[in-house]
Image: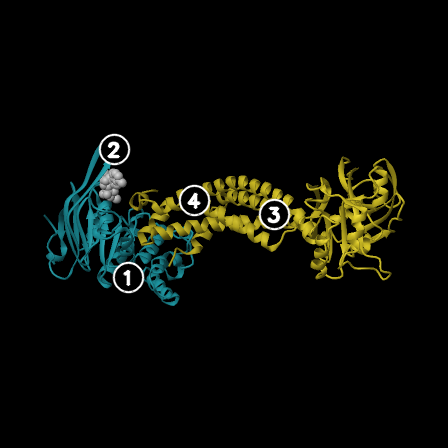
Amino acid sequence: MAIPIEYNLRSIVVRWASALVAVIGIAGTVAVFIVVLAMGQGFKATLASSGSSQNAIVLRGGANSEMESVVTLEETKVIGDAAGVARQVGGTPLYSGEVVVIAPFPLRSSGTDANVQVRGVSALALDVRPNVHLVEGRFFQPGLAELVIGRNASLNYEGLDLGSEVQFGGGTWTVVGIFESGGSSFDSEVWCDATVLNQIYKRPENIFQSVTVHLNSIEAHQEFKDAITSDPRLNVDVYRERDYYEQQSNTIQTVIRQLGVSLALIMAVGAVFAALNTMYSAVAARIREIATLRALGFSPASVLLSFLLESVIIALVGGAIGCLVSLPFNGFTTGTMNWQTFSHLAFAFRVTPAILIAGLAFAVIMGLVGGLPPAMRAARLPVVVALREL
Amino acid sequence: MVRVDCSGTDCLVQVRNLDKKYYRGNEVIDVLRGLNLDVSAGEFVAFMGPSGSGKTTLLNLIGGLDTPTSGTVTVGGEEINDLSGRRLTSWRARHVGFIFQMYNLIPVLTAYQNVQLPLLLTGLSKAERDRHVHTALELVGLADRAKHYPGQLSGGEEQRVAIARAIVADPTLLLCDEPTGDLDRETGDEIIEILHRLSKEHEKTVLMVTHDPLAAEKADSQLHLEKGLLVEAERRGEIS
Ligand SMILES: Nc1ncnc2c1ncn2[C@@H]1O[C@H](COP(=O)(O)OP(=O)(O)O)[C@@H](O)[C@H]1O
Ligand SMILES: [Mg+2]
C-alpha cells in the first residue's frame, strides 16, 4: 500500500503558508484560462444563436461574408421565388434582401465611438426571422428613415433610445422601435429599410449584399439549395443561416482561444515555478521524514507518488479556487469587436461544466509538472545521508 | 577475530570481512576494516565506541540501508548485499525495525498512524492492522495515546511509539541507534527496559548502539568498535 494520503493532507495544512503561493498562482492561471474559454464559448453561442436552421442565407459565389458579397434586385427576386421558400398567406415569399453598413456611435460606458452594424432589411424581416421580435415601439415603415434598434445596441450606445433622432450616413433617422432576438448578434445591430439605407448612403438602389429566406421547413434546405445553385441566372453560395453565423464566429473564437491560451500558458509558467518552489521546500523540510519512510521499507516509487499527489492536491485546491473565482463571470455581458464585420458585438460569457473541468485538468497538469522534479528529488534521496540530517 | 562463533541454525546475523570506506574529496575514510560478527537469534547485543567509530555505519549496513565496500552481511541465511535496491527495500520492510536517537516519528501523523506505517507494506486487512497497532502500543504502554500527535508526547513517549512502530510488523531484527541518547536517565532506563523485555519475553533479536555503559550492561553482550573492528568486552551469556 502507498504512503497514506493523510500524510500529504496534514503536511499541506501544517505548512499551508508555503503552499499559498502555489495555490494563488494556480488559481489565477485557472481563472484566466476559464474566463477566456468562457468568452470564446459565449461569443460562439451568441453568433450561433443568431442563425436559424430553417433560414438560409445567400451570398455571391465565393464571398466569405456579407461584407464581400453583392446580390442584385433581380437576383433577390429569383431567390425569393425558389422552391422551398416559405410564403405568407397571400403568397408573398418570405425573403429579405439586405445591406449592411457600419456606423460609429458613442458607447454609453466610455463615451468613445464604437462601430455598430446597421442592417438594411426588407419590410418582411421580422417574418423571415421569427426569433426576432419587437419589445418596444413599432417596426419601421418602408420608405422612411426610421430605425429599429437591437436591445443590446440601445443599452450600450448613447442616443439610440426610442423616439430619439440620430444622424449618420448623411441622413437623419428616427428611432421607432426596439427589438430583441434572445441574445444573438442581431441584438447588437440597428435595422432599417434596405432601400432607404442605399439612398442615404448614395449606393445603387437595386444592389444588396445578401438574401435571407425563411424556408418551409428545416428539411426544405436541400431543395432550396439545389434550386438556387442549379439556376443559370445565379452565381451564389447558400448556407444554413445557423451554420453561416457559427462559421463567422470561428475566426474570432480561434483568436480569443489563442490569445487566452497563450496568456494562460505564460501564467502557467509562473504557477509551475511557484509549485516547484513550494514542493522543493516541502521536500527539503521533510528530508528526515522521507528517509525514515524509506528506512521503514517504502519504495522510491511510493515516495515519488506521495509527493506528486501532494503537489496535485495543492494544484486542485488552486484549480477549485480558480473555478469559484471565474464562476461570477458566467452570464457577464460584454462587447467585443466582431472581426469579420469590424462592428461591436455584445455577448455573454459562458462558463460551462466542460470549461470548468478543463480548468481543473489544467490545474492538475500544472501540479504534475511542478511536482515532478521535487518528487524525483525526494525519491532519489540517499537514505543514509538523509537520516543524518537534523 | 571476535564474535565469529555461532555455528548452526540459531545464527541469525553473520557479518564477514565487512569493509566500508567513505570518500570525501581525496580523503579516504576507512570506517570498517574487515569486520566480523555473529549474532544469534534472540540475542541482545550492545555496540559501544567513540563517536565516529562507525557504529551507525555498521547498523545501516546490517539493516540494508547502506552497501558495504566489500564483505558480506547475511541475515537469516539471506545475503542482503546481493539484493537489488527494490528487493532490499522490501527486505527491510519485512525484516528490520529501526529505532533512532531522534525517534523519527512523522510529526503530522498520530501515534496510531505512525505505528501503522510498516503494516501498510503488508497485505494485512484494516482490522488486522488495527489489532497489531493496538498490541504494539499496549506493549509500550501507550494504548491510550493512539490519537496523539508526536508533538503532544514527551521524548520518552515518542521513543516508545517509535519502538511500537519498529516491532509492529514483527521484524527479524531490531536495530537501535542510540535509542536513549536524547533522553534523561530515568526515561532512558524505561526504554532500555522495554528493549530488554522484547528480547527476553518476545525473543526479539536486538542490536543497539549506545554510549551509556549502564544501558549496555542490560544487553547479553557488549562489543566495542575500535579502529574498524569489533572487540569483545564481555560475554554475559557465556559467563552465567
Ligand atoms: N556519507 C558519509 N560520507 C563521508 N563520511 C561519512 C559518511 N557517513 C559517515 N561518515 C564518516 O564515517 C565515520 C563513522 O561514522 P558513524 O558511523 O556515524 O559513526 P558513529 O555512529 O560511531 O558516531 C565518521 O568519521 C563519519 O564522519
Ligand atoms: Mg552514530
| Mark 2 Cα shell of 10 Å, populated few (<14), some (14-19), many (≥20) | few
Closer to the camera in the image, A139 or A27: A139
Q: Gap between marks 1 and 4, in whole Å?
A: 32 Å
CB within 8 Å, label 3 to label 4: no
| Chain letter, disc 4 residue | A
Classify residue A56 by image quadrant: bottom right
CB within 8 Å, label 1 to label 3: no
Closer to the camera in the image, B78 or A81: A81
Confirm or reject: label 4 Cβ below 8 Å from ligand 1: no
Confirm or reject: label 3 Cβ below 8 Å from ligand 1: no
Percent x, y of residue B136: 33, 62
Q: Secondary structure at mark 3?
A: helix
Residue at numbered disc 4: A282
Of circles 1 and 2, the one toward us is 2
The quadrant of the rendering that contains the C terminus of chain A is top left
Amino acid beneath label 3: Leu
| Chain letter, disc 3 residue | A
Can residue A128 be seen by looking at this rendering? yes
Amino acid beneath label 4: Ala
- Colour of chain B, in one word, is cyan
Percent x, y of residue B157: 35, 54
Q: Residue furthest bottom?
A: B127
Q: Gap between marks 3 and 4, in whole Å?
A: 33 Å
Q: Gap between marks 1 and 3, in whole Å?
A: 57 Å
Of circles 1 and 4, the one toward us is 4
Amino acid beneath label 1: Asp
| Mark 4 Cα shell of 10 Å, populated few (<14), some (14-19), many (≥20) | many
Kindly identify the residue that appears in the image at 70 percent across and 55 percent down: A225
Residue at numbered disc 1: B170
The chain coloured yellow in the image: A
